[in-house]
Amino acid sequence: MSKKKACKQCKFLVEGDECPVCKSRQFATSYQGRLFVLSPTQSVIAKKVGLSAQGEYAIKVR
């Protein structure tokens, strides 16, 4: 199991070489906290933070 990286643009946590949300290739290995979004259309937190896709996000990317 490889360590997840956080996309520097949208903060989505990925294991591959390209972010599936924003197609960026810029990642950070240092991040704080995780946010799991199951239903972005119904989640108040996802709407407040501006997340539009289901998945795992970093709260703070360094």
Image (spheres, rainbow, N blue to C red):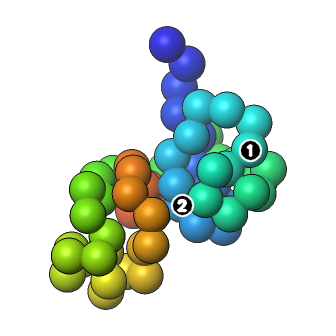
**Residue 24: where, in percent of width, then height?**
76, 57
Q: In this rendering, is residue 7 above or below 9?
A: above
Residue visible at 57% across and 49% down in the picture: 6
**Residue 40: where, in percent of width, then height?**
31, 70
Residue sitting farthest toward the bottom: 48
**Residue 4: where, in percent of width, then height?**
53, 34
Residue 26 horizontal side relative to residue 41, left or right = right
Which mark, by number, is residue 3? none
Which residue does the numbered mark 2 point to in the structure image? 11
Looking at the rendered structure, the kind of residue marked 1 is Glu
Distance from disc 2 to disc 1, alpha carbons, whole Å, reads: 12 Å
Residue 33 visible in the displayed image: no
61 or 47, which lies in front? Answer: 47
**Mark nearer the N terminus (2 vs 1):** 2
Which residue does the numbered mark 1 point to in the structure image? 18
Q: How many C-alpha atoms fall within 10 Å of the one at disc 1: few (<14), some, or many (≥20)?
A: some
Q: Secondary structure at mark 2?
A: loop
Circle 2 or circle 1, nearest the eye: 1
Residue visible at 57% across and 40% down in the picture: 14
